[in-house]
Every structure is written in structure tokens, then in C-alpha cells.
Image (cartoon, rainbow, N blue to C red):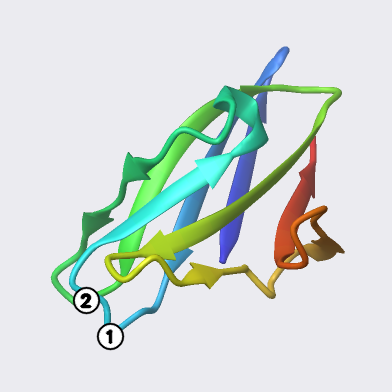
């Protein structure tokens, strides 16, 4: 799930993932050259992270678990990557 709160030229984007079988979850996105950022775990087991991103851009992203499995977010647009996997896309 993706929640977007726009404020001026920036957006606070909160990514939340229900991944009960994951021990660790990382988000990777085009906003920072696909560098992995570890997500935090809520008490209910969901993983989350908030990123501050510039508006008037589109960003591709996905989640990667501790086993290297790529997970896309079905709550937003999906796009095939050049590597044959699926990326999630947000438009700000």
C-alpha cells in the first residue's frame, strides 16, 4: 500500500507491506539509483518506510526480501522492467 501526502514541491510517500513470511524487507527505487533501504517493522508485522520525494516525477520501485526475492506493490501501477521483473510505479 502506498500513501502519498503532497506538501508544496515535495511528497511524503509511505510504503507499507504485509509480508508475514519475511524477516527483513528492503525498498529499492529509481529515486536513489536503486540503493536498498531497510524497512521498519510495525507491531502488527507490516513493514513500512516513508520517503520524501520531489513532485512532478514518476518513480519505479519494488521490495526485496532477505532471500533476494523481488516483490512489486499491486496497489499502484505495474511496469515490466528491462530485467523481466515487475516494478511498481508512482506518479507525483
| Mark 1 in CB contact with mark 2 (< 8 angstroms) | yes
Q: Position of residue 43 (x, y in %)?
A: 13, 70
Q: Position of residue 92 (x, y in %)?
A: 79, 34
* Depicted 66 relative to depicted 14: above or below: below
* Depicted 78 relative to depicted 38: above or below: below
SS at mark 1 in the image: loop
SS at mark 2 in the image: loop
Residue found 72% across the figure and 13% down from its top: 9
Horizontal arrangement in the rendering, residue 38 relative to residue 81 (left or right): left
Mark 1 to mark 2 CA distance (whole Å): 6 Å
Q: Residues within 10 Å of mark 2 (few under 14, many from 20)?
A: some
Q: Residues within 10 Å of mark 1 (few under 14, many from 20)?
A: few
Please name which of the two marks, 1 or 2, marks the residue nearer to the observer.
1
> In terms of image quadrants, where is residue 46?
bottom left
Q: Label 1 belongs to which residue?
A: 20
Residue found 76% across the figure and 47% down from its top: 90
Q: Label 2 belongs to which residue?
A: 45
> In terms of image quadrants, where is residue 5?
top right
- Number of labels in the image equals 2
Amino acid at each position: 500500500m502506498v500513501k502519498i501526502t503532497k506538501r508544496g514541491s515535495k511528497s511524503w510517500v509511505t510504503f507499507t507491506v504485509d509480508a508475514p513470511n519475511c524477516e527483513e524487507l528492503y525498498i529499492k527505487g529509481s529515486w536513489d539509483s536503486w540503493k536498498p533501504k531497510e524497512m521498519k517493522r510495525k507491531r502488527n508485522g507490516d513493514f513500512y518506510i516513508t520517503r520524501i520525494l520531489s513532485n512532478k516525477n514518476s518513480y519505479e520501485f519494488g521490495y526485496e526480501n532477505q532471500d533476494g526475492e523481488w516483490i512489486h506493490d499491486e496497489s499502484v501501477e505495474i511496469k515490466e522492467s528491462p530485467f523481466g521483473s515487475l516494478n511498481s510505479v508512482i506518479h507525483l
